[in-house]
Image (cartoon, grey):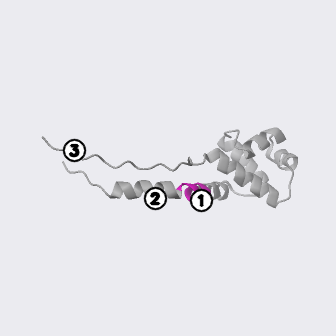
Amino acid sequence: MADFAPLPRVSRSPRPEPLWRHLLGEQLRRRRHERDETLTNTADRAGVSPQYLSEVERGLKEPSSEMIAAIAGALDISLIELTSAVADELRTAAAPASVAVSAARGAFALAA
């Protein structure tokens, strides 16, 4: 019978990874502010209510892909530009945790 060596525990970051909807909202708000636009102006062009846009910007709503595309269009940015910017922020925010996990995974190999 083989002996089993316990695997070390990977310490989790005390700070959880941010949610996609929070980073999306921050990115939309930043872009809107860069254009010096009000919620009402952007919401009108996107075909949504100012309240809905506000909730999206605050990360309270999980918008559909159609809504994200409409809001991006109202801000004159492409969907790929917006999603890439959000993904870059997510990658940056998650980097410390993912580095620790990948380092721990690479340290051990199991043999049959």
Q: Do labels 3 and 1 touch, CB within 8 Å?
A: no
Identify the residue at horizontal 66%, vertical 50% (top origin): 23
- Local crowd at mark 3 within 10 Å, few (<14), some, or many (≥20)? few
Q: Nearer the viewer, mark 1 or mark 2?
A: 2
Q: Position of residue 52 (x, y in %)?
A: 78, 39
Q: Nearer the viewer, residue 110 or 21?
A: 110
Looking at marks 3 and 2 on the same chain, the residue that comes earlier in the sequence is marked by 3
Q: Is residue 10 left or right of residue 65?
A: left
From where the camera sits, is residue 94 visible? yes
> At label 3, which amino acid type do we have?
Phe
Q: Position of residue 86 (x, y in %)?
A: 63, 55
Residue with the mark numbered 2: 99
Identify the residue at horizontal 73%, vertical 52% (top origin): 28
- C-alpha distance separating marks 3 and 1: 40 Å
Position of the N terminus by quadrant: top left
Residue with the mark numbered 3: 4
> At label 2, which amino acid type do we have?
Val
Q: Position of residue 47 (x, y in %)?
A: 81, 42
Q: Magenta segment, which residues?
A: 88-94
Q: How many numbered badges does the structure rendering display?
A: 3
Residue with the mark numbered 1: 88
- C-alpha distance separating marks 1 and 2: 16 Å
In magenta segment, residue 86: no
Identify the residue at horizontal 66%, vertical 47% (top origin): 22
Looking at marks 3 and 1 on the same chain, the residue that comes earlier in the sequence is marked by 3
- Element on which disc 2 rests: helix
- Local crowd at mark 2 within 10 Å, few (<14), some, or many (≥20)? few
Q: Is residue 103 above or below residue 69?
A: below
In magenta segment, residue 92: yes
SS majority, magenta: helix
Q: Position of residue 14 (x, y in %)?
A: 54, 48
Q: Nearer the viewer, mark 3 or mark 1?
A: 3
